[in-house]
Image: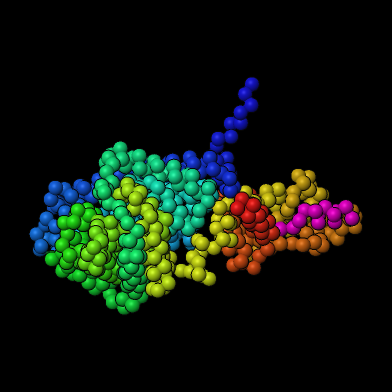
Amino acid sequence: MSNSNPHRFSLESFRRKLASVDALPQLCVLGVIAGVITGCLMTLFRMLLKLGAMFFMPDNDPEAFEQLTPMLRSALPLLAVTLIGGWLALHSGGSRHQIGIAHVIERLTYQQGRFPIRNWISQWWIGLVSVLGGLSAGREGPAIHLGAAASSGLGTALKLPHNSLRVLVACGTAAGISASFNTPLAGVIFAMEVVMMEYTTVGFIPVILASFMGSVISQSVFGFDPPFQKAGVEMDSFIHLPWIAASALLIGLLAGGFVRLARSASRLDILPFALRLGLVGVAVGLTAFWYPEVQGMGYDSMRLTLEGNVAVDVLMAIAIGKLILTAGAVACRVPVSIIGPILVAGGAAGALCGMVGNMLLPGVHTDPALYALIGMAAMMAAVLQAPMAALMALLELTHNPQLMLPSMLAVVVACLTARQLCGCDGFFISVTRYGMHPLQQPLMQALSRISVPAVMERNLTRTRRRLSYEQASALLDANPEWIIIERSSDDKPALAMNAAHLARWLLEHTADDVLIDAEGMFDLLEIPGERLELAPIHLQATLSEAYQCLNENPVDALYVVHGRRPDKPRISGIITRSAIERYYRYEDQSTTKNR
């Protein structure tokens, strides 16, 4: 006879395992599924870009703005902001409709990684229109939002605990970048460094699987070709290092200016949103009339830069104009994606620095292509304050490990310049406390890795406040740890009583000496012993949510709600402040030992 349990592989069992901190096999399964979903979504997004380009772009290339007539490419941004503004007015009623990477981090910080479907749908439309419409925008923002929200939506539909939703968001982020740019390792580092803001083994492994699956699906459809690969680009002498450091200093200042300009949105909010949209469209359109290279992602311009086929004035338009146009769009609350534009602007700035180096050091040959590639990494690292993600992106975009040594110096100098001289945190870090974003705080990181079912006390029973001696004795038959006392009014908090206190009281009293009323009942609240006031929390919540709930409500413990019966909520367990503190101390000790 088989001893297998028919419920062993049930969804309920899967949820319960995910609630604990060591649910690595279950998270790996979710990582694979999230990678497949995100890979398919990004394949569809890239196909839609090509489909849209078929109607008006030469060679069906969504970045061939240089081949359009000056009037057409100048009119496209105005049409784009009109379509974006109309969509936002119709579906969100205003300009504060959030999409993109900042939205992903905000939902992960304050909503445990749950996303509204309305914003997800808007991301499709705005992502396609902003790129095809010639705004200075990339496709990595849509990639991250679409992947993270779809992966999280899978967990929400399955009612998975919120600690697993956080990992699913990271999986969708990594797979989105991997599928969009064929950079699987950079996708993993970006997800952990910029979005999750932590490095854990339990988080890394499923995210790696998701990024792998996303890249496999993308490469099976579009093939693989590193966009910025060029043979022979390397630093041939250490004599270049001082000028590389000086160039990175300049790029760090440009990055700091970009972040400050992009964060000036509050000053522009006095203007009507329609006027701000018009300003963005006019600014991009006028610039594109003479310099179409500022439009779109700009990867084609970057490839020409590496080949040395871009004039100095065009490089200046990309390095400065593209930064200003992108930051201005963000400041006007036009939800464009920034990473593609800043990579290209950093590359142009680096190429200019390489040309200046040739003039200042005529005896030393300086390859502008080397400085262009280093400038890409330096700009990305400085704007995002994500040095590892920038280095990995450069490595995978170029397939040139010879660039790593000089790029490490440039990334460090640029990051320090933007942070210390310009006072800029990472572009997507908008709220800090004690110098840290909420996702970076050690306590909340540890408590977010586990959900309440893994810590709560399940051995409980519930009863009315008044009951007979026999009923009180019957409550103890199942040896409960806690007794939940229901109150007569919903506005009064439920109470939890330690069952040991009732057991001791029953041993010290008999039915004859209990003070009862005419109905033969006595009041549990009159029994000596500690009683904890309770507030509800749902079964999917993480310990960080439970901790915040305890701090926000004047209660001593929480009862865990799992669904609802026709007349009252179903209670699955109880969690106390001391249980949360015990878990955190254990986790902290385990982490210290592992170090």
- Left or right of 333? Residue 296 is left
374 or 496: nearer the viewer: 374
Picture coordinates of residue 439, whole percent (x, y): 50, 61
Residue 336 seen anywhere in this rendered image of the structure: no
Q: Quadrant of residue 263?
A: bottom left
Residue 139 seen anywhere in this rendered image of the structure: yes
Residue ID at (58%, 56%): 446
Picture coordinates of residue 357, whole percent (x, y): 25, 65
Residue ID at (42%, 44%): 210
Picture coordinates of residue 96, whole percent (x, y): 35, 67
Please name the predominant secondary structure of the magenta segment in the image: helix
Q: Quadrant of residue 219?
A: top left
- Left or right of 228? Residue 535 is right
Query: From which residue to which does the magenta span run?
Result: 496-508
The quadrant of the rendering that contains the N terminus is top right
With respect to residue 26, does 162 lie above or below?
below
With respect to residue 367, does 436 lie above or below?
below
- Left or right of 352? Residue 2 is right
157 or 353: nearer the viewer: 353
Residue 98 lies in the magenta stretch: no
Of all residues shown, which one is farthest toward the top? 1
Q: Quadrant of residue 141?
A: bottom left
